[in-house]
Image (tube, helix red, strand yellow):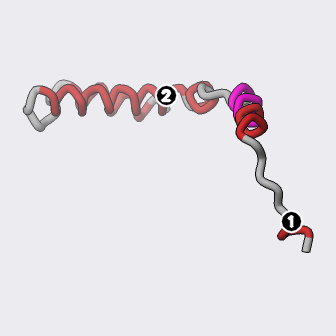
Amino acid sequence: MDKLSFQPKTVAQAKQQFIATAANIDYLAPVKKYPIRSLIIAFSAGVISHTKSHNKGYLSPSLLPLLVSIFRNQ
């Protein structure tokens, strides 16, 4: 029966809990843990957004050796 006696928090309590929890989150932890993968993802996102913005729809052939070397150095 204790599970049914849940008391919702007030807005101020929920806000304080959210601020305390958000202060403890390290948003750069995945980047610090996997720097090469993060670089590949960021580079790929930049290339994709660049090709989409210029309506080319394809990657430059000179980017292929660069991407292969990044994957090999992982």
Q: Based on the displayed image, in which of its 4 quarters is residue 5 positioned? A: bottom right
Question: What residue is shown with label 1?
Answer: 5
Q: Residue at x 67, y 27 (%)?
A: 26
On the image, the x and y values in percent for residue 57 come to 11, 37
Identified at 71% across, 39% down, the residue is 11
The residue furthest bottom is 1
As measured in the structure, the alpha-carbon distance from the residue carrying label 1 to the one carrying label 2 is: 49 Å
Tell which of 16 and 72 is nearer to you. 16
Depth order, front residue of 43/61: 43
Residue nearest the observer in this picture, 14 or 39: 14
* Kind of residue indicated by mark 2: Ile
Could you tell whether 52 is left or right of 42 in the image? left
Q: Position of residue 32 (x, y in %)?
A: 61, 25
For label 2, the residue is 36
Task: Answer with left or right where residue 57 lies relative to residue 25.
Answer: left
Counting from the top left corner in percent of width and height, residue 67 is at 32, 30
Quadrant assignment for the N terminus: bottom right
Residues drawn in magenta: 17-23
Query: Is residue 37 found left or right of 65 in the rendered image?
Result: right
Residue type beneath disc 1: Ser
Mark nearer the N terminus (1 vs 2): 1
Give the number of the mark in front: 1 or 2: 1
